[in-house]
Amino acid sequence: MENKEIAKILEEIALLLEIKGENVFKVRAYQNAARTLYSLTEPVAELVKEGKLEKIKGIGKTLASQIRELVKTGDLAFYRELKKSVPEGLFDMLKVPGLGPKKAKVLYEKLGISSIGELEYACIENRLIKLKGFGAKTQEKIIEGIRYIKKFQGHFLVDEAWDQAMALKSWLREVADDNYLEITGSLRRFKEIVKDIDMLVGTETPDKVMGRFVSFPGVSKVVARGHTKSSAILEQGIAADLRVVRTSQFPHALQHFTGSKEHNVALRQLAKKMNMKMNEYGISRDGREIICSSEAEIYQFLGLEYIVPELREGMGEIEAASEHRLPTLIEVEDIRGIIHVHTTYSDGKCSLEEMVKYVSSQGYEYVGISEHSQTAGYAGGLKIDDLKRQREEIENLREKYPGFGIFWGIESDILPDGSLDYPEDVLAQFDFVIGSVHSGFSNDQDRMMQRLIRALKNPFLTILGHPTGRLLLGRPSYAVDMKELIDVAAEENKVIELNANPHRLDIDWRHCPYAKSRGVKICIGPDAHSQEGIHDIFWGVHCARKGWLEKRDVINCMSVKEISEFFKLMKTK
């Protein structure tokens, strides 16, 4: 191993020891040794060979032994075991500018944060503001630091990519007809995680369009520029590709480049059965080119109902389209109320009235307030006295906003044994109860399922919140059998949340068709901690569309009167 490689390992050991709260002198010993090795002109391997390692200032017996082990084997047992003792994601958090080992240790011990994704989500929920040694400014710096390092990652959340794609699309409108300009790829299908942005333009002046593309202010590097395709890296670190075709080819190229691969393969197989060939430029039969004027016409020509981009995942949509049994998918406009909203009573940014007033101003009929419960101290969970104050304020607001529905709920922690936070006489007072797991993510599947099933059997639970606990690009799902969980929800007549926050989008859309088949209702909740967070409902709806959900499958498509009766019926049952 070279000097720099060994020095880097010693630096990492120092950081790991500091995270674990080891003796400061021990930490400094590794830091000093690393600096020494960085400055050496002679290879460490030669010093080991000549037996001169311990003569170097700051290299004692223990360090010398460890360096020899690295040189001779390329490995160090002490380092390997030390890394195992610290959550991997916690070490990655140290890459965030301004976040040192001491702060990372506090975040882990006080809030249970052990990954960059969890850290970002905690900042969104304002959990660092009241944490000793942090505050609003530190939280903002950490958010900026996370944005910085995310530039260099290869995957992006759908909302991040969408914002950039829309800005690029707006820029290209200067030289492209909006009828022949579209986002394609996985982003058009609203996949929850994407690798890049794909754009398509139909034009007879490709060079003009390409020139406009590479001059986009958000471009940090032009990777390639051609007559039909150009590639660039945007300032946020995401790759963007632009393809140009003739306007007559645009519908076919749009269908092809939207994908997915599985969907396109199935379409081409269908075309082949009909003695036709199909590619990104058109359809041909017996050597005769057939040009369609729209995507809908392409599907119609193949004997299919139009399949919207969200469904093009190779999950039976072509068979359903051929049999005219595609669902009438939910639309954003179908959402009539917002359920799962936090205020300053717990960890939200806005007061209760500010959130009520804002949701009402957006044209919705009702809002469901659901703060964190008392066990969630890290998120300002409400004590019994806090609940009394909030209930009184809600009663006053109901009088102040008589034409708007205000439902009083709680996001109750599902405790390790599966019970809900608060005694039953308190839970009985709420209009609805969301039960969510916020701790104990490392439990094995049997234990986690017992916990969740007990919660679903609780008569006071209305909605199971973000059922897998995942944070996209931040934390995987805890061990859970979603099919069994859905079966229990069906038996107990419980609702499952589709958490619309783009960091979650949980329940996963892939499980929605099964939930639908079992008659389990879904609640699309933004888990809003700010007024801006209300608009995450957009991502939730598109996730629901990918899951084949219709208006009738989602409880907050009900009117204020219907949802009120629904909640009362749930409590009665």
Image: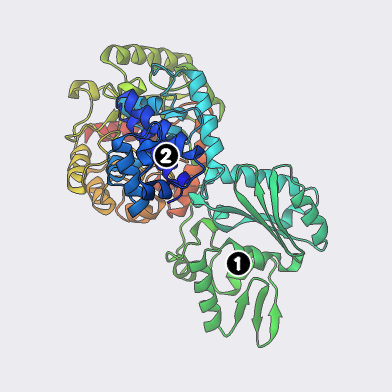
Looking at the picture, which amino acid does disc 2 mark?
A: Asp
Is residue 555 at least partly visible in the picture? no
Q: Residue 256: which disc?
A: 1
Cα–Cα span, label 2 and label 1: 38 Å
Q: Which residue is drawn at 46% across and 28% down?
A: 99
Is residue 396 at least partly visible in the picture? yes
**Residue 462, horizontal then vertical, whole percent:** 29, 35
In this view, 324 is above or below 376: below
Query: How many residues crowd mark 2 within 10 Å: few (<14), some (14–19), many (20+)?
Result: few
Q: Residue 359: which disc?
A: none
**Residue 396, horizontal then vertical, whole percent:** 41, 12
Q: Residue 92: which disc?
A: 2
Q: In this view, does 196 lie to the left or right of 291?
A: left
Q: Residue at x 17, y 47 (%)?
A: 446
Q: In this view, does 25 lie to the left or right of 233?
A: left
In this view, 225 is above or below 530: below
Q: In this view, does 218 lie to the left or right of 396?
A: right
Q: Residue at x 41, y 22 (%)?
A: 347
Could you tell me which secondary element the residue under label 2 belongs to? helix
The answer to which quarter of the image holds residue 27 is top left
Looking at the picture, which amino acid does disc 1 mark?
A: His
Could you tell me which secondary element the residue under label 1 belongs to? helix
**Residue 130, horizontal then vertical, whole percent:** 41, 17
